[in-house]
Image: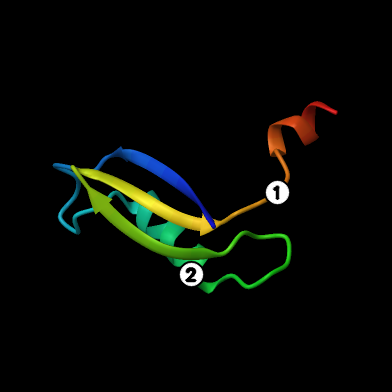
Amino acid sequence: MVAIKKQKNVMGLNDDGLEFYLLREIKLLQELNHPNVIKLHDVFHLNNLLYFALEYGEIDLEDLIVK
């Protein structure tokens, strides 16, 4: 089971094909290995949208912050 994070439309971005912040986030998540950081399993695009397949977390972070 994974969590899917949908990014904005990726058409017509910079010369590298993706905006810098997306490349940076992908690279950091690929390299980080820490129990408090979710793992990135895969990155894919479909219909001009970019998706991250991330480790599934049992905890609702928003609910945890509110409490």
Which label number is shown at residue 25? none
Q: Residue furthest top?
A: 66
Q: Where is mark 2, residue-wise?
A: 30
2 or 1: mark nearer the eye: 1
Pick whichever of labels 2 and 1 is earlier in the sequence: 2
- For the residues marked 2 and 1, what is the alpha-carbon distance in whole angstroms? 21 Å
Give 1 or 40, whichever is nearer the viewer. Answer: 1
| Element carrying mark 1 | loop
**Residue 21 vertical placement versus 60 (above, below):** below
Task: Write the residue at 29% across / 49% down.
Answer: 19
What amino acid type should be assigned to the residue bearing mark 1?
Glu
The answer to which quarter of the image holds residue 48 is top left
Residue type at mark 2: give it. Gln
Label 1, residues with CA under 10 Å away: few <14, some 14-19, many ≥20: few
Quadrant of the rendered image containing residue 27: bottom left
Q: Quickly name the residue at label 1.
A: 58
Colouring chosen for the image of the structure: rainbow
Indicate whether 64 appears above or below 33: above
| Residue 15 relative to residue 1: left or right | left
